[in-house]
Image (cartoon, rainbow, N blue to C red):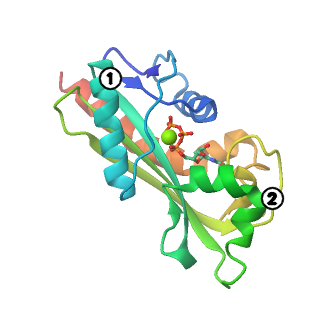
Amino acid sequence: MLTCSRHSVFVTGNKYKLMEVQAILKGTVDLESHKVDLPELQGTPEDIAAEKCRIAAEKLQGPCITEDTCLCYNAMNGLPGPYIKWFMESIGHEGLNRMLDGFQDKTAYALCTFAYSKGPGHDPVIFDGKTPGRIVPARGPPDFGWDAVFEPDGFDQTYAELDKDVKNTISHRFRALEKLQAYLAAEKASE
Ligand SMILES: O=c1[nH]c(=O)c2ncn([C@@H]3O[C@H](COP(=O)(O)OP(=O)(O)OP(=O)(O)O)[C@@H](O)[C@H]3O)c2[nH]1
Ligand SMILES: [Mg+2]
């Protein structure tokens, strides 16, 4: 759980997400973090992101921000998508490559969907960010999820090999956060 302003709290159980969000938002908002477990849901990325945020707002009984991340293979019409967490845990980096053995198309995109709710009973607002790339044999530190097998377009390094400062200016997460920041700033200005 990450307090982003007087009114906003970011909820995640993933410390790497938290570190990236803190790095991207640095200096622009005050941050404070805690961990809250949220269920893994099924559906479209947007529906999952919205439902996750509704549940978090109920749990906290207050306003909050959540985020759900997908890794989408174009050859598979967007799968594993929101289920990437289980694929990653079950078959690892090698399996994520082998899934594409039967396909010539190795392209994929990373998708981040932030959701912001003003509190229980309020429909969450959605902000997405997408970075296209391709799936490659793992290179770079294996710490964060599937970073080592995702090479963003325009780079010959994987997310894991890129400097954090570079990843954080081209990533799916950065692109979604830009939209969320603009929304929160406009909301604050209208108060
Ligand atoms: O290499 C990566 N680079 C990234 O930038 C990235 N962002 C998320 N992930 C992984 O993709 C799954 C998303 O599932 P997810 O959105 O449900 O996250 P989570 O359950 O870990 O946390 P949360 O749901 O409490 O926020 C999880 O396995 C995350 O570790 C990433 N892997
Ligand atoms: Mg999750």
Between label 2 and label 1, give the one nearer the viewer. Answer: 1
Three-letter amino acid code of the residue under disc 2? Ala
Observer able to see residue 153 = no
Q: In this view, does 108 lie to the left or right of 99?
A: left
Q: Tell me the SS state at disc 2.
A: loop
Disc 2 and disc 1: Cα gap in Å? 37 Å
Q: In which quarter of the image is ligand 1?
A: top right
Question: In the picture, residue 6 is in which quadrant?
Answer: top left
Question: In the picture, residue 97 is in which quadrant?
Answer: bottom right
Q: Is residue 23 left or right of residue 160?
A: left
Residue 52 vs 148, above or below: the answer is: above
Observer able to see residue 126 = yes
Mark 2 neighbour density, 10 Å: few (under 14) some (14–19) many (20 or more): many
Residue 13 vs 146, above or below: the answer is: above
Q: How many numbered marks, from 0 up? A: 2
Query: Dot 1 corresponds to which residue?
Result: 59
Query: Dot 2 corresponds to which residue?
Result: 138
Residue 139 vs 191, above or below: the answer is: below
Q: Which residue is drawn at 69% across and 84% down?
A: 102
Three-letter amino acid code of the residue under disc 1? Lys
> Nearer the N terminus, badge 2 or badge 1?
1
Residue 177's disc is none
The residue closer to the viewer here, 39 or 172, is 39
Q: Residue at x 68, y 39 (%)?
A: 165
Horizontal and vertical percent position of residue 189: 24, 26
The residue closer to the viewer here, 187 or 86, is 86
